[in-house]
Amino acid sequence: RTRIKNERYESGVIPYAKMGYWDPNYVIKDTDILALFRVSPQPGVDPVEASAAVAGESSTATWTVVWTDLLTACDLYRAKAYKVDAVPNTSDQYFAYIAYDIDLFEEGSIANLTASIIGNVFGFKAVKALRLEDMRIPVAYLKTFQGPATGIVVERERMDKFGRPFLGATVKPKLGLSGKNYGRVVYEGLKGGLDFLKDDENINSQPFMRWKERFLYSMEAVNRSIAATGEVKGHYMNVTAATMEDMYERAEFAKQLGTVIIMIDLVIGYTAIQTMAIWSRKNDMILHLHRAGNSTYSRQKIHGMNFRVICKWMRMAGVDHI
């Protein structure tokens, strides 16, 4: 058992670096989850302390010392900031490398992973800006997720198309078309040479065209284009809706109509995405994700989250492509 000095548990506030969240000698384990943050400390805040604060607040720490630390193996469960480098060509930005023990996270849960990594640290007072640049997910944790069900090889087999990129497009205008005219656009595009057409992120079930009408006309267009060209064609059916019950209903109807692919939006949330990925695997359906909303995380270069991280999470969740 690790011996803890008694003064560690005296009431009051201790710098995070002295609480054990900074350890430049830490030896990374193969099972550790690693995160790379771009940290912009507040003026006067030491970058090491800011990095330790991020490690602390994304794992076991709170703003003050608590006696209940005695009830758990805090030395094991504390995230460790183990390296801090200045970002080249900047004066106030630093790369913080943080390691998390695998036992801090529920298996197979993007929601739980993100609740720690990005859940409570981005408004932290010690930093004026914070960006999650990358993550290393160990195999031991990765294997608890189902991952994509299809993959490019199987998708090519289903489409019977090899040796070239797939060619697709999005129906425009994305809002306002009637169901019949929407289907006409799908047919003309597929007959003209596209492999796929797709719904856009915000076409769901509006008064000008309800979802079932869109699905029926779109699949009629797909079937007509297959008959006209002799090729396998597809249309991404957006099943995004207000509730999981509605999304299940739309996905089931799309399956009954014979579609090979459905789509969902990033804005439905990580749990809903994982849930639809499980449904897609069980129902032999290709799942496309529209990255709607990603720029709220990824556009700013010093705050938010790099899109590569979102892509990794979505692959873990089971999305075939984004």
Image: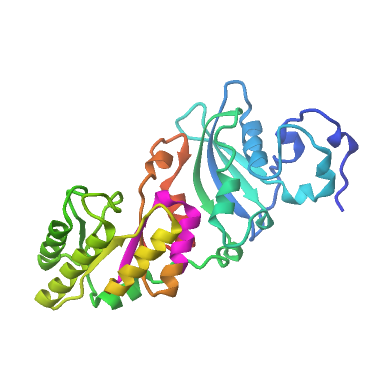
The residue under the point 50% across, 35% down is 87
| Residue 318: percent from left, percent from top | 45, 64
Above or below: residue 84 compared with residue 179? above
| Residue 35: percent from left, percent from top | 56, 48
| Relative side of 293 to 231, left or right | right
In this rendered view, identify the residue nearer to me: 305 or 97.
305
The residue under the point 71% across, 35% down is 17
| Relative side of 266 to 177, left or right | right
Q: How many marks?
A: 0
List the single residue furthest toward the front. Answer: 207
Above or below: residue 310 compared with residue 13? below
| Residue 137: percent from left, percent from top | 55, 57
List the single residue furthest toward the right. Answer: 6
The residue under the point 20% across, 64% down is 218
Visible in this render: residue 287? Answer: no
- Quadrant of residue 230 within the rendered picture: bottom left
| Residue 269 painted magenta | yes
| Residue 44: percent from left, percent from top | 61, 21
| Residue 114 painted magenta | no
Above or below: residue 74 compared with residue 251? above
In this rendered view, identify the residue nearer to me: 272 or 136.
272
| Rendered image coloring scheme | rainbow
In this rendered view, identify the residue nearer to me: 97 or 252.
252
Q: Which residues are magenta?
A: 260-278
Above or below: residue 66 compared with residue 309? above
**What secondary structure predominates along the stretch shown in magenta?**
helix
Of the 4 image quadrants, the one containing the C terminus is bottom left
Visible in this render: residue 4? Answer: yes
